[in-house]
Image: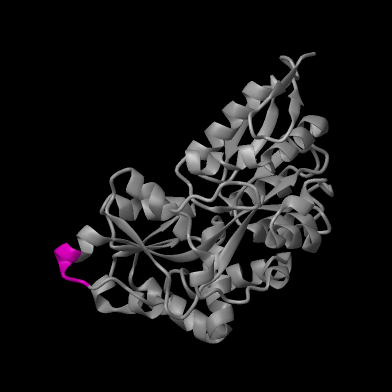
Amino acid sequence: MAALVLAGAGGPLWAQGAGEPLQLMCSVREEWCSLIATTFGRVSGAKVQVVRRGSGDALAQLAAERASPRIDVWFGGTGDPHLQAAELGLTQAYKSPSLPQLRLWAQAQAKQSNWHTVGVYMGPLGIAVNTDVLARRGVAAPQCWHDLLQPAFRGQVVVSHPASSGTAYTFVATLVQLLGEDKAFDYFKALHQNVGQYTRAGTAAVRVVGRGEAMASVSFLQDVPAERLQGAPVAGVVPCEGTGAEIGSMSMVRGAPHPELARRFYEWALTPGAQQFGVAAGQFHVPSHRDTPMDPRMPSLPRTRLVNYDYVKYGSVAERQRLIDRWEREVTAPPH
């Protein structure tokens, strides 16, 4: 078989021929999923079949299929569900030789999971706003999380649901760490009065704002430039109280049907060449490989007020389920 090389990707990938496809669970935007699937397929000679899921839904699917896994690799999505998948024994331990070339937060994610997952990108949580809608309504842009509780935002805030969305779970865990749990849930209950729509995926929320159907969303700030590229008048706000950040991760599934192909994709996805496809697809996360070029539109992490996010605690199965149960019981449950 002839070796095929992707420029800048760090090494050759051997063509696989027309065998069974790599089953890729993808929890980033459709454009990025499509680009990495197409490119890896071209340079490896392998077929790639993509199943796109929000990270909460992806975790649920892996748990449902644990007796007979159908997915090979889970790419992207917030790191908490990846840590939970590791805790549940749904993913395969693997210590990549590329780890020393990754940023420290990516290495820490791998170590915390006992090598069951690895960080592939990072991005801070914040507020996305439609500046045209705000101006038309005469409403000042929110500068703090608590500004979203103002009467002017009634029905104008979009939030995803923490059971299906890693964005929303990061929001819940962030506010719990910033305010304390009881005060955070008081905030969520007050915010609920202003929420016009709960979406399944976090990326859907910022798109609603981009279309001018709402004034603000709780979103990862790296999603904002993608909307601006589409011509949407969207801006990002780092809340004054502080915020959390996601460590988007990647895991190989335990008992994957194509483990060798999964490992090859995993190694390829950690290379600088492969990590540039996030920006190529209009996504502006901070990449985990130190040698990946930094786009000026990426969020500037040193200027953000990042909470000391406890990824181990809030990445545990029990803590996630407890907080989601409390959210559904106290925030979104219909009144009796």
Q: Residue at coordinates 49% horizontally, 71% vertically from top-left? A: 304
Locate residue 28, reporting x and y percent: 54, 46
Does the magenta segment cover residue 281?
no
Which one is nearer the viewer's eye here, 74 or 306?
A: 306
State the residue at coordinates (73%, 47%): 251
Q: How is the image coloured?
A: one colour
Quadrant showing the N terminus: top right
Left or right, residue 17 beside residue 309: right
Residue closest to the eye, 277 or 166: 277
Comparing 150 with 103, the one in front is: 103
- Quadrant the C terminus occupies: bottom left
| Residue 75 can be seen, yes or no | yes
> Quarter of the image holding residue 314?
bottom right
Asked whether, in this view, residue 18 is left or right of residue 52, the answer is right
Question: How many circles with numbers are drawn on the protein?
Answer: 0
Identify the residue at image location x=42%, y=79%: 240
- Relative to residue 329, is residue 296 depicted above or below? above
Q: Which residues are magenta?
A: 135-139
Query: Residue 281, image x and y in percent?
Result: 48, 39
**From this viewpoint, is residue 200 visible?**
no
The location of residue 264, given as percent across then percent down, is 76, 33
Taking the image as shown, residue 98 lies to the left or right of residue 300, namely right
Q: Main secondary structure of the magenta part?
A: helix
Instruction: Pinpoint residue 214: horizontal percent, then vertical percent.
Output: 28, 59
In-image side of 152 versus 77 (left or right): left
| Residue 39 quadrant | top right
> Any magenta on residue 138?
yes
